[in-house]
Image (spheres, rainbow, N blue to C red):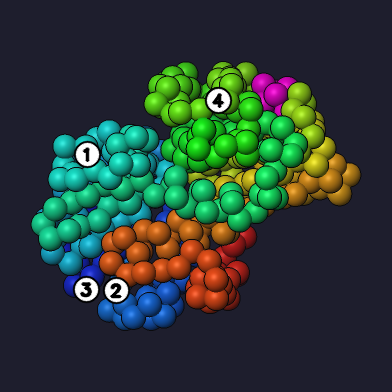
């Protein structure tokens, strides 16, 4: 794929991305399906280049909508572009998708096609799993999110909401090479009830992100939300960049040539860094979508979630570096 599209022969979940065949989900999903009692379910990849023409997205979404056994999709990389291109094709849009103007999940309820944004949920579960208790309340540390796409929208929304009380960052910095993406996330933040100060940084000049990094306080959370390392080669930082002391560094990806992750690990001991990759985010992201599309209950913690995570680890460990 993409197109021509052929009718699914059994209940099928599609994975709309850039290089879906390299993802661990292709070997993990059949094992999860068996574990969850979805023995007849299948997964199929649909690959598009970055910022594909709108008609390509519409063709794929229209096929899923009309094909009886095509149950839905997980969307990565194309979440914003696909939503913009296909908004009129959806019969329902969940509140998170309305708020973030993106679709990371497509499900069907009868003949109705529904767009969901699951990143605010899966990103929040992942963040709350690895951040130390009351981290921002204790440290007053900043958050620096590199990249202003859908993941950055979800992460910033989860962290900066006033409802987090004193455990919200007082300052959030967002950088991107695209003025349009920065304008879009600025518009989104106007809808968020927050007391955080937000800086929007044009990172089109090489070294800009290095400069921001060098000004962060100890304990800052730094996130690579650019897709560089997986969807495109490289890192948003140069090798001269210095991470903040005792910083918490999160690479959203778990596979590919993860230069950003390698840069952080080289400084981990000297700078006292906590370094996280995207593996747990991968698990939460997929299980949230599978639960929605197939109408099953999947826990987000505890022994049952640990069993699901173990299945993924055993099946996918060989491809985490692929």
**Mark 2 touching mark 3, by CB under 8 A?**
yes
* Mark 4 vs mark 3: in front: 4
Q: CA distance from mark 4 to mark 2?
A: 45 Å
Q: CA distance from mark 1 to mark 3?
A: 25 Å
Q: Position of residue 171 (x, y in %)?
A: 63, 26
Give the residue drawn at x 39%, y 49%: 118
Please say whether residue 39 is one of the residues in the magenta stretch: no
Name the residue that disc number 3 marks: 10
**Mark 1 touching mark 3, by CB under 8 A?**
no
Label located before the other in sequence (4 or 3) = 3
Label located before the other in sequence (1 or 3) = 3
Q: Which residues are magenta?
A: 207-213
Name the residue that disc number 1 marks: 86
Residue 314 picture quarter: bottom right
- Per the rendering, the mark at residue 195 is 4
Name the residue that disc number 2 marks: 41
Label located before the other in sequence (2 or 3) = 3
Mark 4, secondary structure of its residue = loop
Label located before the other in sequence (4 or 2) = 2
Q: Position of residue 154 (x, y in %)?
A: 47, 40
Label located before the other in sequence (1 or 4) = 1
* Mark 1 vs mark 4: in front: 4
Please say whether residue 210 is one of the residues in the magenta stretch: yes
**Neighbour tally class for label 3: few under 14, some 14-19, many 20 plus, Cα within 10 Å:** some
* Residue 235 visible, this angle: no
Q: CA distance from mark 2 to mark 1?
A: 25 Å
């Amino acid at each position: 794929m993409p197109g021509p599209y052929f009718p699914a022969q059994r209940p099928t979940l599609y994975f709309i991305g850039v290089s879906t065949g390299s993802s661990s989900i292709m070997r993990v999903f059949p094992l999860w399906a068996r574990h969850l009692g979805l023995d007849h379910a299948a997964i199929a990849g649909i690959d598009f280049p970055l910022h594909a023409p709108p008609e390509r997205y519409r063709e794929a979404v229209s096929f899923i909508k009309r094909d009886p056994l095509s149950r839905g999709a997980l969307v990565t990389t194309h979440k914003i572009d696909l939503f913009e291109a296909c908004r009129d094709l959806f019969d329902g849009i969940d509140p998170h998708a309305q708020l973030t103007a993106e679709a990371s999940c497509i499900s069907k309820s009868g003949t109705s096609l529904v767009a969901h944004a699951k990143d605010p949920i899966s990103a929040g579960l992942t963040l709350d799993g690895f951040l130390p208790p009351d981290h921002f309340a204790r440290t007053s540390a900043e958050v620096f999110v590199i990249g202003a796409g859908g993941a950055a929208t979800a992460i910033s929304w989860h962290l900066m909401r006033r409802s987090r009380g004193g455990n919200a960052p007082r300052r959030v910095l967002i950088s991107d090479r695209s003025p349009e993406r920065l304008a879009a996330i600025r518009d989104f933040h106007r809808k968020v009830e927050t007391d955080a100060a937000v800086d929007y940084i044009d990172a089109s000049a090489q070294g800009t992100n290095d400069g921001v990094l060098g000004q962060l306080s100890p304990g800052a959370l730094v996130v690579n939300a650019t897709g560089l390392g997986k969807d495109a080669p490289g890192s948003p930082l140069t090798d001269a960049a210095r991470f903040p002391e005792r910083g918490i560094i999160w690479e959203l990806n778990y596979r590919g040539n993860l230069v950003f992750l390698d840069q952080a690990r080289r400084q981990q001991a000297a700078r006292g860094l906590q370094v996280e990759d995207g593996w747990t985010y991968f698990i939460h992201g997929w299980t949230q979508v599978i639960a929605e599309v197939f109408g099953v209950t999947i826990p987000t913690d505890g022994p049952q979630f640990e069993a699901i995570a173990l299945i993924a680890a055993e099946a996918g460990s060989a491809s985490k570096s692929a």
